[in-house]
Image (cartoon, rainbow, N blue to C red):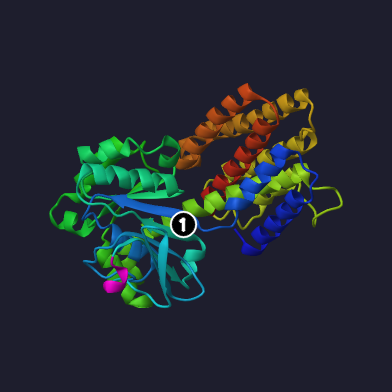
Amino acid sequence: MQLDRAEEVRTRVEAVVSDGTLPANARDYGEQLLSRFGKPVRVVILGLPGSGKTQLLNMLVGRRLIPDGRSLPALEVIAGASWRTRAAREGDTTQSFDRLVTEGPELAGARLLTLEAPLAILERISLLEVAADDTVDSQWRAVETGAKHAEVLIWCTQVFTEVERMLWNHVPGALKDHAFLAVTKADELQRAGLLPQRLASMNSALAEEFCEILPVATLRALAALDDGENGQSAFAASGGRALRNAVLKHVEQGRRADLDTALLFLRRYETAGGGTGIPRLADATGSVADASVVSSGNWAFADQALNHLRDCANILAQLAPEGATDKYVKFLSACADALDGLSELLATQGSAAASTSFHDTLSEASEMLLLLRLEKGAGPAADAATLLLQVRRELEDELAG
């Protein structure tokens, strides 16, 4: 998502929310959009003691912020203009240091350590590792705290024991849709001849619980990052690049969804004379026809799918509801027809036309739209349009390869 475009949209939403003419519920919704729009996505790292959480955090940041063997309280890493450390203690007292501090008497009694760092990746994500000992009660509190603060969650493990399964069962289902299982210390498992079987077993038992299950040799990945450009191939071989890219891709999809939602909010509430011109839904959806997007994949399916989305977008733009119940019904029905048409195209082209991931996305979107049609009204209509835009985004990623 282009930062200048996101900033423009955020400014326009702020103007609409602050002009004092919105209904109360619309103003509250706009404020909710602003509270999350453009901010780094909070990634929480969980797992049993010794599972490699801290080194995974280092790997995602791209440098060894936390040395090996440090016993720290809850740790968060956020963007900052300069290196800075804050140690929060009981009683809401905080001590600050204009440098990176990860050990020493300055941290005695700290319950939360916050590291601010001028690193580019922290403009996209912030990181939180929740501290816990090896007792189940402490682990349960860590999961509860982590789930409360997470937008994306990474669980570190080598085995995924029954205790981990029990803990994971308490994670909200909605958050599991944004969760990754990192099989850490993959190089040790590989040397022991356990990695292929372990991954197969986890994929069989846990595929529905996580977005992706990815192996990573974290220490090898960090060593590769220390080598800079010379270590890029080793970083890829360690699994570090695949995990980092998967998380960042997921984060970017979420930011795109926020942008889509904000554009739909503006379409409904921005005055005709305000802003710099709201793109019609047809324009936004039709943009995937750019030939640069269609760089790989099944060309026959791509051509038909893009034409189908463009045609449906023109219909939806004409049906955009203005308050009448029958218009909401027609709009939701047209959204359902758009997804049904894509499903039919996939069926006629065969399973090789798109990846399993896109098939699953389209199936889940169709099921969600069925529920939205049962609700009817303005909210479900807006959600349905957002859902179509998200499918469009997934198709863009599919075709860009």
- Amino acid type, residue under disc 1 in the picture: Leu
105 magenta-colored? yes
* Residue 335 covered by magenta stretch: no
Query: Circle 1 sits on which residue?
Result: 248
Residue 390 screen position, x and y as percent? 58, 43
Please provide percent x and percent y for residue 3: 62, 63
Q: Nearer the viewer, residue 193 or 289?
A: 193
Residue projecting furthest to the left: 192
Q: Is residue 401 visible?
A: no
Residue 220 at what x, y percent from top left? Answer: 26, 66
Q: Main secondary structure of the magenta part?
A: helix
Q: Give left or right: position of 383 versus 43.
A: right
Q: Is residue 114 left or right of residue 137?
A: right
Question: Which residues are drawn in magenta?
Answer: 104-108
Quarter holding the N terminus is: bottom right
Q: Residues within 10 Å of mark 1 (few under 14, many from 20)?
A: some
Where, by quadrant of the figure, is residue 52 drawn?
bottom left
Which residue appears at 34% of the width and 38% of the height?
207
Check the image and report above or below for 224 versus 124.
below
